[in-house]
Image (tube, rainbow, N blue to C red):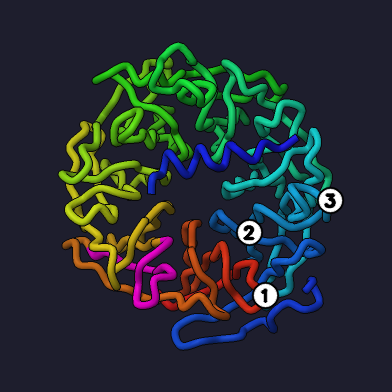
Amino acid sequence: MYRVPRLAKICTILAGAFVAAAMTAGSSAAGVTVLYAFCAQANCSDGNSPRAGLITDGPGNLYGTTYYGGTPGCTNGSGCGTVFRITKKGAESVIYTFAGGSDGANPTAPLYRDATGNLYGTTTGGTTDGAGNVFKVAQDGTESVLYQFTGGSDGDLPYSGVIADAQGNLYGTTVFGGYSGNTACEGYNGCGVVYEVAPNGTETVLHEFNFAGAHDSAFPHAGLVMDKRGTMYGTATGNPYYAGDGNIFKIAPDGTYSVLFFFAGLKNGARPYANLIAAGKHFFGTTSGGGPSRAGTVFDISKGGKLNTLFNFTGGSDGDLPIAPLITDKNGNLYGTTEKGGANGDGTVFEVAPDGTESVLYSFTGADDGADPIGGLIAMKGFLYGTTSSGGQYGGGTVFKVPE
């Protein structure tokens, strides 16, 4: 069964209708087009609260997950979540509905799509031990559980999605589980792990976070990025009350773990919550807190570990709490979302130029356009596409697009 108290742990770490009733495709407010609005009632089969960004296929269909919705009665009546598809014209269809059993419940991460159209992802709950799983959904909507976490040394709560190598091995992180001998992670079932799941379902733990003073951190919420040599890079969120302000790490192909950078709160950011993105010899990312205003930062870091803060959020109209990954264009401009802040306090879509100048492309109102964008963006043909986790015409979040 899904364990609700685990959500409270995540909040501590961060410190901080139906289908037929859906909004008409193409409904617009100034600067934004809402492609779809999710329902927020217990009997919403279309999904409720998309907390991850989107991916796309060749024809331009969008794919994503919702944390709630789907099967009524699951997760205290709110539903256990869905995998969905939305066409360019805004027609939504549910590919898979989670039931909260061995199939999992409450996905929070974006999907990965292979060359044949299979979708891969993770759930944070459900399963035999309530610890989440790694799943695959075929084109016909059939779900297969590739690995089920036990909540012990193998990991617990895979909040992020997975990446794949050329051999079909999947890689990701869990927030909890793994090493449990450190008092900094006491009560959290361990400090989290980096894992590999082979095509045959065998799981291997590549690193157990242990918050070993100046040598490690804890609680990785973000997924991984892999370079051409097979080295993986990621972030651990940490926690100022338990495990510092977080770090940026790498794992070499031979499994060697090393820390590239430790964050230091007000100085350069804290609690990196989002995946890194690679661009040349650098990576770009965000911290959800820290910086002079404690509202988060946008940074770049070299593979050698030299970090440069590009922008410090103030927590006002420029945005607050950036917890989603960035994307970049050919000119080096970065695009992302903040969960809070903006003109109305309901989040933003922003751009940061190479010189560090920030522009707010859109401020959400919390009304029909949605509120609290937690997921990242994708770009297609001059538009940025994303999700809001709440708000919208029916209160269950939205799928939107804004001009670049």
Residue 396 percent coordinates (x, y): 65, 67
Q: Residues within 10 Å of mark 3 (few under 14, many from 20)?
A: few
CB atoms of marks 2 and 3 within 8 Å: no
> Which residue is disc 2 drawn over?
57
Query: Image check: 92 left or right of 62?
Result: right
* SS under mark 3: loop
Q: Earlier in the sequence, mark 2 or mark 3?
A: 2
- Provide residue 22's location: percent of width, then percent of height: 73, 77
Residue 394: numbered disc: 1
Q: Position of residue 364 (x, y in %)?
A: 45, 75
Closer to the eye: label 1 or 3: 1
Circle 2: element type: loop
| Three-letter code for the amino acid on which mark 2 is drawn | Asp
- Residue at image point 30% right, 35% down: 240
In the rendered image, which residue does mark 3 sit on?
A: 140
Q: Please tell me in which quadrant of the rendered image residue 118 appears.
A: top right
